[in-house]
Image: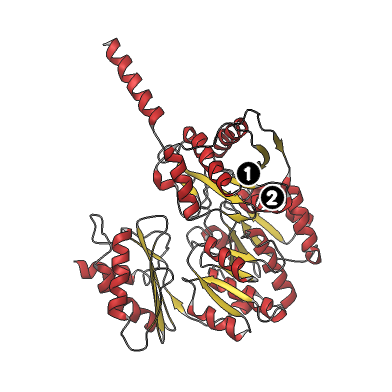
Amino acid sequence: MKRLSFFLLFFLRLQFLLAEADPAIFREYDIRGIVDEQIAVEDIPDIALAIVTYLRTVDNTVKTLAIGSDGRVHSPPIKAAMVNTLLKHGFDIIDIGTCTTPVMYYASHKLSVDAALMITASHNPGNYNGIKIRLGQRAVSGDEIRTIRDFYFSKSFISMSPQLGVCKDYDLITDYIDYLATHFSHLVGKKIDAVIDCGNGAAGTVLPALIKAMQWEDSVSLLFSEVDGTYPNHVADPTSEKNMADLKKVVLNSPGWIGIGLDGDCDRMAPMTSKGLLIKGDQLLALFSKPLLENNPDSRVVFDISSSLFLHQLIKNWGGTPLIAKTGISNVSRMMSDNHAAIGGEISCHTIFSDRYFGFDDGIYSMMRLFEMLHESKLTLEEMVAILPNCVSSPTYRLPCERSACLELIDELYQELSCEEGTEIIAIDGIRIHYPDAWAIVRPSNTEPLASIRFEGRTQQDLEWIEERFAPIINRYVEFIGSPKPVMLESDCSPKQKRFVESLRNIRS
């Protein structure tokens, strides 16, 4: 019996040692998964080697890396495993501590580093973690992540250096705060009247000191500023109405104050009006673009294909050049760089400024630009939003659908609808179909087996019409996984907004 137990323990230990990370963690924009299910601390040494092996294939002079981490429970051991592995292979490390992802991006501009890594899973729940990668001053994504995946599973790593690397700690947050305080010195001591929901994310490493530096103690208050990787109050995704419920209560009880929501690693910012209206990413980009185009006519503005129809026309009306990118902030950033665009953003409230900033998405910097815009215009956020066309849009429906089935769905939509009178089709990322008074987009998720679907109409009647037009076709492809009602992710739907999903249910039953 003892011998059997010994061999069983030996077998289990061998299985553990041979276990590898789930291939699904190598996503479109980063490496990310559920800790101890898809990715474990024990996987990190080989993941670290796969990353630097790829970096060296692009630039064989890569030597020094900045590494930061968010406040997740697993971030310290993951970072320690990453740092120790890289030091053993001769890489020098600048440890910038617990910080926001934009502070890591800032490191690539301000420190003498060849690359930068951030241990984070952005807005995902606390049981997730992962790694964002920057080479020089650009994000590593797409095929590059897939190449890192291939290096990881083939174990084709660079050779170990005979000389150990050196690790130094660096307080970059203080530099970052000084930069922002100098850049926005005209706002020092001004009455801002804002409540900021940090969501227990990494924003709490910056905002208390920034508020003090800006002398805003009496006009800016913080909600959930304690960095807590268990996210005890809500998931740190500010685009969700459900997650912003506490912020809304505070705002509604603070007459004239606006709300600011930041995500877990602080690369996104979603504002809320004093009446509790949460501003969408395409609306936010429009608000930022108007004064920018007034001061810089003929500038290019990049937005993702899921953004509202009104955005394209507004940018043209304001003298700018609208450019449509595939979904994903990395795609927006790449198109901005290729076309020397002044600003870009996407529906999920990532915003990139390159007119007066470094050209990366930064929730706190976006917040500062919003405060500046409100101060200089003397308008309220409600008054600013009122200038935008009042289109009616659905949430983003994310329905279970394997990628192959989603591509078949897109092909069928093209075949069936492209010949309809008055339609216009854009096919750079899935399919976007325009009618005179409504549009729809269907695209495969880059990270999960889901179809991402969104509708918009000039009126409620137009929205209902296009949802009903698409429902029978979409119904043939989405999976119901044992239930007559599809699973919905990342959408907080009111009873009216559930109409489209219920229509699918009625067709199926």
Residues at circles 2 and 1 in contact by the CB criterion of under 8 Å: yes
What kind of residue is marked 1?
A: Gly
Quarter-of-image position of residue 376: bottom right
Indicate left or right for 498 with 483 as reference: right
Q: Which mark is residue 107?
A: 2
Give how far across and how far down residue 399 sits, in percent. Answer: 34, 62
Alpha-carbon span between mark 2 and mark 1: 10 Å
Query: Residue 442 versus residue 194: which sits nearer the camera?
Result: 442
Q: Quadrant of the C terminus?
A: bottom left
- Secondary structure at badge 1 equals strand
Does 30 sit above or below residue 319?
above
Q: Which mark is residue 158?
A: none
Residue found 65% across the figure and 64% down from its top: 366
What kind of residue is marked 2?
A: Ala
Query: Residue 211 versus residue 440: which sits nearer the camera?
Result: 440
Q: Which mark is residue 68?
A: 1
Label 1 crowd (10 A; few <14 / some 14-19 / many >=20)? many
